[in-house]
Structure formats: C-alpha cells, structure tokens
Image: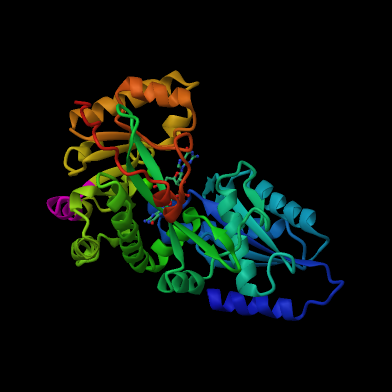
Amino acid sequence: MTRTELVTLLARQIEAWHEGDGALGVMVVRLQRVREFGQFYGYAAADALGEAAYARISSVLRPQDTVVRVGLYEYVVMLPGLRGDNHAALAGARVVRAFESPVPVGQRTAPIAVKVGISVYPDHGRNAERLLHNAETAYGASLHDSDDSALYDAEGTPPLIPYESLQQAIAANRLDVHLQPMMDLRTRRIVAVESLARWHDEQLGWVAPDRFIPLAEETGLISPLTRWSLNATLRHAARARAIDPDLCFSINLSPRVFGERDLVAQVTSALGIWNIPASAVTLEVTESALMEDPKLSLRRLEDLRMEGLGISIDDFGAGYSSLAYLKFFPATELKIDRGFIVDLRDDRRSIQLVRSIVDLGHHLKMRVVAEGVEDAESLAMLAEMGCDCAQGYYIQRPQPADDFIDSLQPATEPASPLH
Ligand code: C2E
Ligand code: CA
Ligand code: CA
C-alpha cells in the first residue's frame, strides 16, 4: 500500500470515529537489521520474510485491528477502540514479544527484532498526517530505548517550528546576536567573542539555536541565516572595535553553505562593508560536519584562509575523529568540545585527553580554546596545561551584543612614565 492510500485509509477511520468509541491507536512497526537477509537470499526470500512477519504481527492483535504492509519490512497498524495510553502500549509490547522466537521462512528460520512507535487519536493529533508523524517520532525514540516499543510523548517533544516563522524572522531581521567572551589564559584578558544566534518568537517564545539551526540546515534557510549572521555580527564588531580595537570575533559557519559558490565573496564583502580586517574574524566549523564532504570543506576553508580569516575546528573530539584530515585542514584554532571540559575536575581520563589535545593543537601550530568552562578549578587546570583560551559560564554567559559592548572598557593605555 502506498503512503497516500494509507493516509486515506486512516483519515476514513478518523472520520468514522465517535466520542465514546475509545482512542484510535496508530502503530508503526519495522523489522530491524534485516537488510542482509535480502542481500544473502534474494528478493523473493526477503519478501517471504516480510509476509511471515505480517502474519506474526496479525496473530497477536485483535480482529478489529488492521495491519497494513507499507514496505518490504514496514507495517502500520490501526487499533480502534483502545481504552487509553496503557492499552496502546500493551499492544506495542505484544508485537515486540511476538518476535521473541525466530520467524520461519521456507526452509530457514530468521531471528528478527522489531521496533515499534505508537501515537493515539485524538490526544496525539487530529488528522492522519499528524498521527503518522507522531508515531514515527515515537518509533525514533524506540530506537534508543531498550523497551523496543515507545508511545508518543506529547510533553517530551517540543512543538515543531513552522518553516514560515523562521523564514520571516530571518527576513525581517528579528534574530539577535548574543556574544560570549573568550579569555586569554596567560593575560586573563578578553581577547575574542563568539557570536551566537538567538530567536524570540511571539508565539513560540525563546527558541534555542539547537532547534532552529538544524531546521535551517534541513530547509535551505541556512543560506539567508548565514548572511544575516555575518552582517549582524560584523556590524556589532565595528562598534565594539571602536572601543577595543584588538577584540576578535568568532562566527559559527554551517558547512551546508560550503556548496555556495559565492560564499567567499559574501564573507569578504561583509568584511568590507563594516571595515573589519579578515584577521580579526575566525570562522568556527564543527568537526563532524567537516567530514561529511572533506574535499569540498577543504577547498572552501583554504579559500577563506587565503583571505586571511581564522578557521576554528569546533566541538573537537566530539565527532568522528579525523586526525588523518586534521593536518590538511588549514585551521588556526582547535576548540575542545564541552564534553571533555565538564568532566575535568573528576575524571582523570579527561585530564589526560585534554592535555593531549592541547599538545596536539600546539604541534599543529594552532591556538587551543576550551569551551564550557564552568568553575575556577577547571580554569586553573586548563591554564596549567598550557591551553591558550577559555570560554564558558564561569567567565561569562552569552549576553545581548549591545549589553556586552556597552560594558566594554577602552583598552588601557600603557602607564605613562612619571618623569
Ligand atoms: P557551539 O558553537 O558549540 O556554541 C557553544 C554553546 O555552548 C552555546 O550554546 C553556548 O551558550 C553554550 N555554552 C557556553 N558556555 C557554556 C558553559 O559553560 N556550559 C554549558 N553547558 N554551555 C555553555 P547555544 O548558544 O545554545 O548554541 C548552540 C549551538 O548552535 C552552537 O554550538 C552552534 O553550533 C549553533 N549556533 C549558534 N548560533 C549560530 C549561528 O549564528 N550560526 C550557526 N551556523 N550556528 C549557530
Ligand atoms: Ca561555536
Ligand atoms: Ca562548540
């Protein structure tokens, strides 16, 4: 059955629903780790396995439940007349348990695991699309859950951000720049600030960048967002550097924009407009993102570096280790992932790791920055290890750019000799 047919079928069940009928459950079931089965035994055997699993699922459900096979190893089940969430969860558990013994397929038997996601009408959605979407979300949660079956959790899932809201917020310049300082661990002076995007929406309230940046990346809005971020940050940079001419700025760059031909021109023209030297700006790129397309990343980073910009490898150590590539990337800075820094005080392995990363960065002639520093003890340890800079709540939380700039003191003149 196609997805459209499925949606139609489910919509019909919803239409026929009456108050007092009980809840209507929608369950997504997928067999796990079965791809090899088809590769080994061929399509006919794979299809037979899919059919056998269909029969197995049907065998543990009630006569009024409808099981639909929507893919080779995928099923959607409609469960009318449920007595509530627990009843729905019970159906999920029954399906999981049905696969405790291997499934016979022709001459063979296949050990099969399944994962199940369930949503319930009317609580988890008022139409077929939303119910299916939420059952998929629950399925996604089941992948990380030892229970193998998950019920949609309306409270645990923040509301979706409508694409149009973000698009309009970017277009209308309604995002804000917050700045968080980085401290030089030798001089204890603030030498740079990182620009972090903030969004306050009338309906949604404060939306964290961890939610809207991925949305922007998935939908292509990351291009206008990057243009906004470059211009808005450099506008603040111009004002800040009028007070402290040595202050440097770090801007996060999503590698999703590396595909854009005019990226380098965008950056240099923004620098020109605000009259900021390229050497005062560092672009932060996350390590794992670099690895998605190392060749393209390398080319773009080289172009940007040639223009004189600094390049920082953000969240270093959190992603796939790319030590082999590290020596090729024209990076000027390594930013150690927060995850290592929070453990510094209590975990000896983290101490060793951070020490090694500091040495590694220095051997490669990079500045090393620790982020996520939350206490004095960690700061002292990092200084002792020779880490160059630190950033984190202990030094200062990110704050609105204007507030930060208003608090800036002009760099003190060297004390003039008394005589
Ligand atoms: P990031 O680049 O790793 O930014 C550092 C994050 O750590 C920020 O979260 C910051 O508020 C937080 N942080 C700073 N000090 C501490 C600390 O001591 N403890 C803890 N627990 N956290 C600390 P934020 O602002 O929520 O940003 C999250 C991520 O969103 C950023 O991670 C960055 O990847 C992305 N992002 C933010 N603004 C932009 C932007 O303008 N463009 C792009 N492409 N990405 C952005
Ligand atoms: Ca960053
Ligand atoms: Ca980071």
- Would you identify the image quadrant in which residue 67 lies? bottom right
Picture layout, residue 318 above or below residue 419? below
Residue 176 part of the magenta segment: no
35 lies left or right of 27: left
Taking the spot 73% from the left edge, 81% from the top edge, the residue there is 15
| Residue nearer the viewer, 230 or 311 | 230
Picture layout, residue 154 above or below residue 329? below
Quarter of the figure with the N terminus: bottom right
Q: Position of residue 286 (x, y in %)?
A: 33, 47
Residue at the extreme right:
20
Residue at the extreme left:
306
Q: Position of residue 95 (x, y in %)?
A: 67, 53
Q: Position of residue 103 (x, y in %)?
A: 58, 49
Residue 304 part of the magenta segment: yes
Q: Position of residue 409 (x, y in %)?
A: 36, 43
Picture layout, residue 177 above or below residue 375? below
Taking the spot 62% from the left edge, 54% from the top edge, the residue there is 116
Which secondary structure class fits the magenta region best?
A: helix
Picture layout, residue 396 above or below residue 282? above
Which range of residues does the magenta coloring cover? 298-310
Quarter of the figure with the C terminus: top left
Q: Is residue 399 visible?
A: yes
Taking the spot 35% from the left edge, 45% from the top edge, the residue there is 193
| Residue nearer the viewer, 276 or 24 | 276
| Residue nearer the viewer, 124 or 54 | 124
105 lies left or right of 246: right
